[in-house]
Image (tube, rainbow, N blue to C red):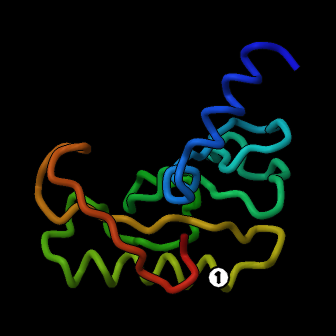
Amino acid sequence: MGVAALITWATLLSLTPQQKAAIVVVSGLPSPRGVGAVIVGRWNRSASRPAGVLVVTDQEGGAVKSFPELPPRTAASAVHNKADAYASARARGLAVTRAPPTERARFASSFHLLDRPVGLARRSRAAVPGDV
């Protein structure tokens, strides 16, 4: 084990369970062993994904989506209230859970509550129990 590996191991030992849970390694496909999430887009959505990983994708609705056959049908920019945003995210989450196992993925449902650019005044909430 090299010095960098020892330092990394020592750092991981000092983290709380919450801090460890916050660390997710995101990879493109094909992905190396041990990643927590993979980036899936229109260009690689048929590629095999490791079991149990999160899928990071653009699924905002309207024309911006990696899975065009799944909700939301409305573009995120057209959603202006919390109830509609929740309904949109829930519809997408339920569609994913009904997908065949080969297409099923774990998505993190999120939406913007305020009309701001990404990163400003952003709040996220799981819309479907089990959506991580």
Instruction: Residue type at mark 1: give it.
Output: Thr
In the image, is 7 to the left or to the right of 29?
A: left
Where residue 3 sits in the image (x, y, percent)?
76, 13
Where residue 20 sits in the image (x, y, percent)?
58, 51
Q: Quadrant of the C terminus?
A: bottom right
In the image, is 129 to the left or to the right of 7?
A: left
Where residue 122 sits in the image (x, y, percent)?
22, 55
Q: Residue at x 15, y 52 (%)?
A: 121
Q: Residue at x 83, y 54 (%)?
A: 50
Mark 1 highlights which residue? 97
Q: Residue at x 14, y 75 (%)?
A: 81
Query: Could you say which is closer to the camera, residue 21 or residue 77?
Result: 21
Location of residue 70 (image quadrant): bottom right
Where residue 100 sits in the image (x, y, percent)?
79, 78
Location of residue 131 (image quadrant): bottom right
In the image, is 17 to the left or to the right of 51?
A: left
Q: Residues within 10 Å of mark 1 (few under 14, many from 20)?
A: some
Q: Quadrant of the N terminus?
A: top right
Q: Residue at x 71, y 51 (%)?
A: 45
Q: Is residue 55 above or below residue 6?
A: below
Query: Could you say which is closer to the camera, residue 114 or residue 32?
Result: 32
Query: Could you say which is closer to the camera, residue 47 or residue 113?
Result: 113
Q: Is residue 84 above or below residue 6?
A: below
Tell me the SS state at disc 1.
helix
Badge count: 1
Q: Is residue 97 above or below residue 112?
A: below
